[in-house]
Amino acid sequence: MMVERRTAAELPEITGARALVYSLGIEGRDLARWLLARGASVTMADTRSAEQLEAAGAQPPEGVERAVRGELLDPEGFDLLAVSQSVLRNDANIVRARELGIPVVSQLALALRLCRGRVIGITGSSGKSTTTALVGAIAESASIEHLVGGNLGGSLLDRIEDLPETASVILEMSHTQLQYTDRSPEIAAVTNVTPNHLDQFSWPEYVDLKRNILRYQDADGLAILNADDETSREFRADVRGRLAEVSLAGPVAGDGAWLEGKAIVSRWGGAAETVAGTADLRMRGRHNVANAVLATAIAGAMGLPGEAVATALRSFPGLPHRLQVVGRAHGATWINDSIATSPERTLAALDAVPEPAILLLGGREKALPLENLRVAAGERCRAAICFGEAATPFAEAMAGAVETVVRVETLEEAVAAAAAIAREGDAVLLSPAGTSFDAYPRFEARGEAFAALVAALDGFEEATS
């Protein structure tokens, strides 16, 4: 067994404990329900206002004794602090809790302690959600007992604790989730590591958090790294167990998966096997080919049959808000890529869209460099419409590179501006390169708002699968 698993009995005594939960979001509510079910007295706190929490649908579960809005309570006097990934490890309250000797736990840290099944963890700067969901689709095609969760959202603790040892648990792991973990999954996969979230962490800190996914493995663990990504290659020195790799540039040494011409090829301890072709994929873009190759490698490591892999690759449509075609209006195809919260993701989206593009950029920026995006937009876009809190820096970056640059306040105004200049054969691409937090609680909410605005345009025709 790769990772020594601990049981709930080794956690601080839960029954009767005074537990403080930071965040009324999805993870905070999951933690609160788990603690309540085990007899803890639960108080919750969130920095958001009552109005913001109501708009996000974030209400405390039944049984919570007290919910404080607008601030994080001082942890003194509590027996346990349970935190959502949204609360960073250097927060003054987290530091204080540790100084007071109060145990700090998170949803993912608890899940790794409680799970009896085999854990497959997937992290990276981009592609981790799609890869996680695709591995789940392969597991479904193979008819094995499995659970998909983690950063993809939803409840986790009550589901994971009931799984048998024979189950496979496929978890997306973000850098902020990994900041609280002290265990690694048996199979740890990294999509890529590129500059992101530099408004929260320095680049070395961010890289080090990603490294946590394999930091606690032992000789029986397996790390699957991206041989095409410079930072992922640096992780080779941190591998404590077995190493496999993936590449779009041709065969890898040893086990893994790669792209050979237009064939997705896998090898695990024997001869290489062609699993599927890139023409079989329903998802747009070379970055999604990379996601498919990594999912193929993970499935091989799990021992899943090639037929199940091929079936899933051919049928998987991708996730919402990721290059999702909303429909046609004003002669253009309208595409929702609200997941693109960094310039790197927007670059991948532009690479995947062959049509002349009207690019919608905006939201809240993360202090990331925009030069590569400026160059690509200059080559691929006939217009850039910049909206939201970051409208000015995005517009300044696009000026002189893109023929038409429009600056507006809101997403609604951005859609209207795009409709006014769209023409036959265009693609109007919402790939904002910034987070949604200036106007929406989640990138999903921004994508849903975009889809609704597009659907209201004159002559709109919904996309068909």
Image (cartoon, rainbow, N blue to C red):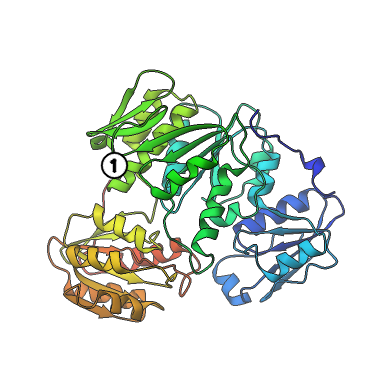
Q: Say which of 322 and 122 sits in front.
A: 122
Residue ID for mark 1: 282
- Residue shown at 57% from the left, 57% from the top: 176
Can residue 456 be spotted in the picture?
no
Residue 210: where, in percent of width, then height? 53, 51
Q: Position of residue 272 (x, y in %)?
A: 34, 22
Q: Residue furthest left?
A: 424
Q: Element type at marker 1?
A: loop
Q: Is residue 268 left or right of residue 396?
A: right
Residue 283 or residue 394, whichever sits in front: 394
Screen quadrant of the N terminus: top right
Residue 187: image location, x then y, percent: 54, 35
Q: Residue at x 30, y 68 (%)?
A: 371
Q: Quadrant of residue 205?
A: bottom right
Q: Amino acid at mark 1?
A: Arg
The answer to which of 451 and 396 lies nearer the viewer is: 396
Relative placement, left or right, of 338 versus 201 is left
